[in-house]
Image (tube, helix red, strand yellow):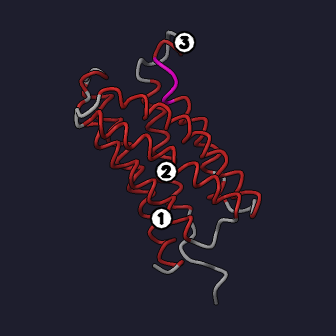
Amino acid sequence: MNKTNSIRWANWLAVSGGAFWIAFHLYYIFSGIDYLEIGASILLAALGLFFMALAVFSLLQGPHLGTAGKTGGGILLAGMTLVFLGASLVGLNLWGGAWLLAIGGEALTTLGLAIFSLGALAQAPRSLWKWVPLFLAPVYFVSFSTTSGSFPAWASVDTPEWFAVLYGAGWVLFGFLLPQRDWSRP
């Protein structure tokens, strides 16, 4: 795959991943299922995460990231891989303790988002798409590390899930803001 094609793939993979992520969390909010009864529907979120990880992998193959951005991207991919494995194993009812993998992966993903963005910004701070992961890091952290009891009484019981929806929307935005081609080539 040449570098221009990897950039185009990253666009659509990020948008698709964000859309699947949003779909799962909206289903979770509006279906009224308990978190213990999620079952195989977690595979929808895992699919979204898989597409997001492929988008990051595609970016790592392209010309838009320097060494620091690629290092952050590697950390981000490691975190996403752990979340994907944990969610898939739990969703397929293969290993209930895999939630520990997912939780560790979520923490690593948050760190990876911040390092990825800071590394990319160090190279070219004017590129708008490079700022998106920096803003997604705290949104993602709040979505997985809080419960409804973490917010004031007037807040919705689904507030953490709404942060997860916002995180997915950020990936959709990220996909649309990614460059469509390698502008360094004639």
Dot 1: within a 10 Å radius of its alpha carbon, few (fewer than 14), some, or many (20 or more) residues? many
Q: Amino acid at mark 1?
A: Asn
Which mark is drawn over residue 11? Answer: 1
The chief SS type of the magenta part is: helix
The quadrant of the picture occupied by the C terminus is bottom right
Residue 85 place in picture, x, y as percent: 37, 42
Dot 2: within a 10 Å radius of its alpha carbon, few (fewer than 14), some, or many (20 or more) residues? many
Q: Pick whichever, 26 or 2, lies toward us.
A: 2
* Residue occupied by mark 2: 171
- Give the vertical position of 101 relative to 6 (above or below): above
Spot the residue most to the bottom: 186
Dot 3: within a 10 Å radius of its alpha carbon, few (fewer than 14), some, or many (20 or more) residues? few
What is the CA distance from the residue labelled 3 to the residue labelled 2?
Answer: 27 Å
Which mark is drawn over residue 152? Answer: 3
Q: Which callout, 3 or 2, points to the residue nearer the camera?
A: 2
Going from the N terminus, do you reach mark 3 or mark 2 first? 3
- Give the vertical position of 125 relative to 35 (above or below): below
The quadrant of the picture occupied by the N terminus is bottom left
Q: Quadrant of residue 60?
A: bottom right
In the image, what residue occupies the spot 44% across and 42% down? Answer: 82
Q: Secondary structure at mark 2?
A: helix
Going from the N terminus, do you reach mark 3 or mark 1 first? 1
Which mark is drawn over residue 34? Answer: none
Which stretch did the figure color magenta? Answer: 143-147
Q: Are marks 3 and 1 in contact (CB under 8 Å)?
A: no
In the image, what residue occupies the spot 60% across and 45% down? Answer: 112
Q: Amino acid at mark 3?
A: Pro
Would residue 18 be counted in the magenta stretch?
no
